Amino acid sequence: MIEAAVSINDELLDDSLTDEQKSEIKELFKNLKDPWWRITSGKIYKIIIKGEVSEDGEQLTEDTVLPFIPNRHQLRFMKRMWNRNLILKARQLGFTTLVAILWLDHALYNPNARCGIIAQDRQNAEIIFRDKVMFAYNNMPESLKAMFPTASQNKSEVVFAHNNSSVRVATSLRGGTIHRLHVSEYGKICAKSPDKAKEVKTGSIPAVPTTGIIIIESTAEGKEGDYHDKVQASIKREEAGREANRKDFKLHFYPWFAADEYRINPDGVNITDKQHEYFNEIEVLMNTKIDLEQRAWYVVTLENDFSWEKEVMNREYPSTPKEAFEVSIEGNYYHKQMSIMRKQGRILKIPKLDLPVFTFWDIGNGDGCAVWFMQMVGMEYRFIDYEEGHGETIGHYVKLLQSKNYIWGKHFMPHDADHKRLSEENKSVKEMFEDKGLLNIEIVPRITNIQDGIQQTREAMPEVYIDKESCALGITRLDNYKKQWNEKQERWSELPKHDINSEGADSFRQFAQAKALGLIKVAGQNRPKARKSGNWRTA
């Protein structure tokens, strides 16, 4: 196609054009064979920067149309682009815009190419297609656009007549080969729409051949989901010093301090010694320099945009890949309480004292089981241990508790542990545990509304201390216990999301419900005598 365009170059230079216009056309067609020039020159593609709109829809400032010239982050990515790419980034660095133009350019100049973009929802899909892909196409130089007529077009896909290539933007792409695939905000898709994330993982990604290109881009959304897992696998591969092959995903991290625009005049901005200490640590860790203007921007953004919610700042403007995934707060039941616990230093290393240990259980309807271990010291509820398992027998958990060699208080189990199960033994879980020697089991009465139990948990948390090492997995479960996302209504529902975090959060809730009912009691703080038989010790 490019050769044909060059050969008809003279036909485009009619007498109505000025010498300057003729010169521009000659330069255009001379450079068309170079894809780097097409993308970076600012001569081919344009972008639209939306003006501000008031809450009632009034246009406050006009839209701005500019030649597309990649910024430093986009140029860096283009130079480092691999077959399979993960972009972990700060907000608003323009990667979706870049990919839209890359895919459009690839489709225009390569026959039978299938280029796709997966957006997090239908509204975003339509915006990306209309305002990024088609806007760039419709605003190409007229002499060039005439060479690339469309065969068909709707709200989500354009097919070009000259070479049968296409660009499609949708919430799902399945079936057939995809030569170029971009997944926008995959972290949000994984957090809110697990079924859609599974479709991306099992359907869309495998549809791209190893010679194709995949770009998965997102801010972080907590320590779970396929996006998180892929980023962690890439980090581990790089730390091990193994070169990426075509099936490996390569991580591209773009922190906030790498963006020139994230800086302000520091005059009048109060940056505390603790904040300076944080910036100094990041400088060493990331081998960078964070100047006073950048520090001022960070502090002002943290205060004004996010009301000192550091977890939100970590997600939207991360300084390190690890920091980006520390906590996801959207739809999280216990975000506020866990945040306060961290600020007050109540997640720490806790000594295990020779005092009674209470356990709180959740025995899932499937094969999961979670147990929290707690000691009472005055008015402090100290969680010193956490265990969970899947597909294990009751005997396994009995042996696990015996191996701890704690002094045991009561073992609090949920109401369904008292239900007889139809089996050869026809016994309840409580009875089966007692047969194995686990004594002092108390059933926590059923709560009619789980929201009441969640509220009781929130109310109990100010008196809670958690061991940061022995309970690390349990902390993750509490951090990531979320509401279900209602895709039709596009909002969080009031029902909990049932996933790998559920059992750990539910077992912790048994503590709060038992506390609210006054069931947690210590007969005395003196050390009880050990039982003579076996290795069980009870208060």
Image (tube, helix red, strand yellow):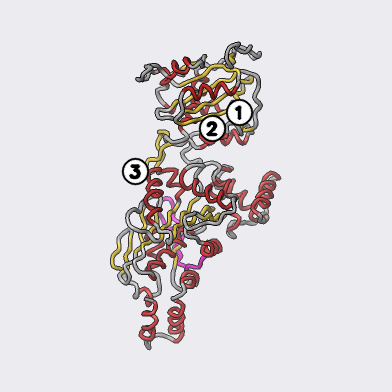
| Left or right, residue 56 beside residue 301 | left
- Distance from Cα at disc 3 to Cα at disc 1: 39 Å
Element assignment for label 3: loop
Q: Mark 3 or mark 1: which is in front?
A: 1
- Distance from Cα at disc 2 to Cα at disc 1: 13 Å
- Distance from Cα at disc 3 to Cα at disc 2: 32 Å
Q: Amino acid at mark 3?
A: Lys
Q: Which residue is mark 2?
A: 474
Label 2 packing within 10 angstroms: few (<14), some (14-19), many (20+): many
Q: Residue furthest left?
A: 152
Label 3 packing within 10 angstroms: few (<14), some (14-19), many (20+): few
Residue 240 image position (x, y, % from top left): 59, 50
Q: Residue furthest bottom?
A: 15
Q: Are marks 3 and 2 in contact (CB under 8 Å)?
A: no
Q: Mark 2 or mark 1: which is in front?
A: 2
Q: Which residue is mark 3?
A: 488
Q: Which residue is mark 1?
A: 465
Label ID, residue 356: none
Rendered position, 345 above or below 135: above
Rendered position, 210 above or below 341: below
| Left or right, residue 472 beside residue 527 | left
Q: Amino acid at mark 1?
A: Tyr
Q: Mark 3 or mark 2: which is in front?
A: 2
Residue sitting at x 42%, y 43%: 192
Q: Amino acid at mark 2?
A: Gly
3 or 1: tag closer to the N-terminus: 1
Q: Which residues are magenta?
A: 52-71
Residue sitting at x 52%, y 58%: 93
2 or 1: tag closer to the N-terminus: 1
Magenta-drawn stretch contains 68: yes
The image quarter containing residue 113 is bottom left
